[in-house]
Image (cartoon, helix red, strand yellow):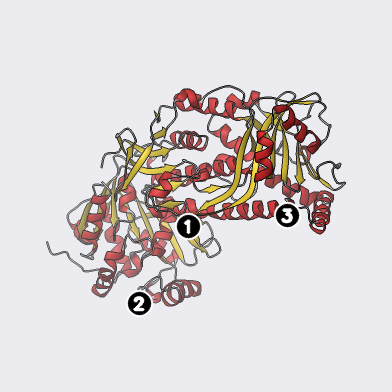
Amino acid sequence: MDYDCDILIAGGGLNGPALALGLAQAGFRVTMVDNRSERARADSNFDGRGYALALASKRLLNAIGVWADVAKDSQPMLDIKVTDGRAGEGPSPFFLHFDHTELEEGPMGFMVEDRFLYRAFLKAVQSEPNITQINEDSVVDQEITPAGVIATLASGRTITAKLLVGCDGRKTGVGKRAGIRRTGWEYGQTALVCAIEHALPHNGIAHQFFMPPGPLAILPLPGNRSSIVWTETDDNAKAIHALSDKDYLAVLRPRFGDFLGEISLAGARFTYPLGLTVADRFVSERVALVGDAAHGLHPIAGQGLNAGLRDVGALVQVLTEAKQRGEDIASILVLERYEQWRRFDTQSLVATTDLTNKLFSNDNPLLRIGRDLGLGLVNQVPGLRRRFMREAAGLTGDLPNLMR
Amino acid sequence: MQPTLNTVDPAEVAKFQAMAAEWWDPNGKFKPLHMLNPCRLDYITRQIAAEYDRDLSADLPFKGLTILDIGCGGGLLSEPMARLGASVVGADAAAGNIPVAQVHAEQSGLTIDYRHTTAEAIAEAGEQFDVVINMEVVEHVADPQEFLTVCQRLVKPGGLMLCSTLNRTVKSFGAAIIGAEWIMRWLPKGTHEWHKFITPDELFDMLTKGGLNPVDRKGFVFNPLGWSWSISDRDLSVNYVTASTKPA
């Protein structure tokens, strides 16, 4: 069988190019298919969306040659303050405080706006000779043979590869056609996302307030700007999203008080319904799933992209090791190593995220006292606090080489 | 051609013939071998790369090397070597393994010279290779010393032989016979005879007597917690592997 490439990647969002770059540097020939045009992907208008990249993710971006390009537009998160709050009241006296000076590795994470990430990825992909991009097209069919996979694109073109990787999101067509089923549940919550401009500096501090309808995160962007991820019940969110900018701000303001001074909207407003969906398998014969295609997470701790980049690091390492041993990189024997590695991490992340959300999105007074005592306790014990910080920085568990 | 089977125990050959069709099923009877394979390949590829100064991250790093895989079975080691660019001869005394290996190599788009023959027959023909891979064979032959001496003749002067087997310890009796054959049923009962197992010192002696310079020994250790194998510098108590060079 003649191959057009070693690995075909369906989906050119963020995990797709990250994987393409990691694999290309390891000597694989990669083709990446995305249904948008290059221009649409690298649209550089400020829209207020950002990612809280854990330190481990930053290291991966550095290893694949993307970080240098986004570093100047990133905001290090120097402190993270976690508070149990209630609308209209001041924060409860019990809170968690993670100061980066306690962690030898430096800041736990970095805020990067997605426009900078997309642009840096596109530039890196364009200058990598081992990557072929196919734009404004998508994989619509896949045939698995003993030696490879033959993918048919919407345009009618066919591409042969040794391995097909689905970086095509939680509605993954690659996974569906491989017969991989998913389990998932809805939370009845919607995330409201926007960016604000504020009068006072944020000093690189990220805040997470746990409110009864759901958490509110204030994540520092460069300058006097912050990204807000604000979770409400579906009905509340719908009503709030329908408000004018002025009324929207009037609802938001009392949620976190006046410590940033006068605030105004910067950029567009977005809503994302929250749900958790996990694929029953992350691999099948000659197919692997990465990122949301494998596990769509509740974005409560900004772990979606971080988990996806961990998939990328693990898959690059498993495939590189297999290639250097002379193994068939797409045999189920090899792919199951990736699945085994990532399933364990994902299950604990899913469980923790789900539990955190159930525990904190609640106004039960007993639960509230309990979690306040818990937060206070974690805060008082430096060893425990550092463990949480390392967890937030993505430094725990079995780290892929690209993240070390 | 009727191969000469002088050092091969006919009962052993028949046993493996019965198992041949299962070679490439990752969850079939050869599951333990598939699990061990990454570890074996790590050792083999690194030894060859070091001996012949090859860069494993390059494309086709073993291009130009000739490799003989003795007891190739279904091709679990022959295929990776061919994929890395080597010209591979896979030899097996069990005729049933050859078509299985051939069919699979063809499916994988690899060219491998599989032969139903023995080490003795190839040595008689005067063929020599840069690398001879001799994994988990020596504990199944009737006369290990004679077998290893024959294998030495197959290595080009200055070439490399990689040889693995099972140590004869209380632990290996527990792991390979009781564990793998009786309890886990990973291998059919009677696959191994413990008294035929060889200690690393005995193997080094036999390799030296056979005309080779043994230069390295490592253990393959099973970790039940991670359910995987790893290479160990110290623990050679069950499975182990050696590297020997032939004087130029």
Q: Kindly identify which chain the residue marked by label 2 belongs to.
A: B
According to the picture, the residue beneath numbered tag 1 turns out to be B218
Dot 3: few (<14), some (14–19), or many (≥20) neighbours within 10 Å?
some
Dividing the picture into quarters, in which one does residue B164 lie?
bottom left
Camera-side residue of B237 and A251:
A251
Where in the figure is residue B17, as x and y percent of width and height? 25, 69
Query: Relative to residue B223, is residue B197 depicted above or below?
Result: below
Check disc 1 and report its element: helix, strand or loop: strand
Q: Kindly identify which chain the residue marked by label 1 belongs to.
A: B
Please report the residue visible at 54 percent of the width from the left and 51 percent of the height from the top: A277
Where in the figure is residue B231, as x and y percent of width and height? 49, 56
According to the picture, the residue beneath numbered tag 2 turns out to be B190
Q: Residue furthest left?
A: B1
According to the picture, the residue beneath numbered tag 3 turns out to be A359
Please indicate whether residue A202 sits to the left or right of residue A26 in the image: right
Please indicate whether residue A243 sits to the left or right of residue A19 in the image: right
Please report the residue visible at 49 percent of the width from the left and 25 percent of the height from the top: A40
In what quadrant of the picture does the C terminus of chain A appear?
top right
- The alpha-carbon separation of the residues under discs 3 and 1 comes to 51 Å
Camera-side residue of B157 and A230:
A230
Check disc 2 and report its element: helix, strand or loop: loop
Dividing the picture into quarters, in which one does residue A165 lie?
top left
- The alpha-carbon separation of the residues under discs 2 and 1 comes to 26 Å
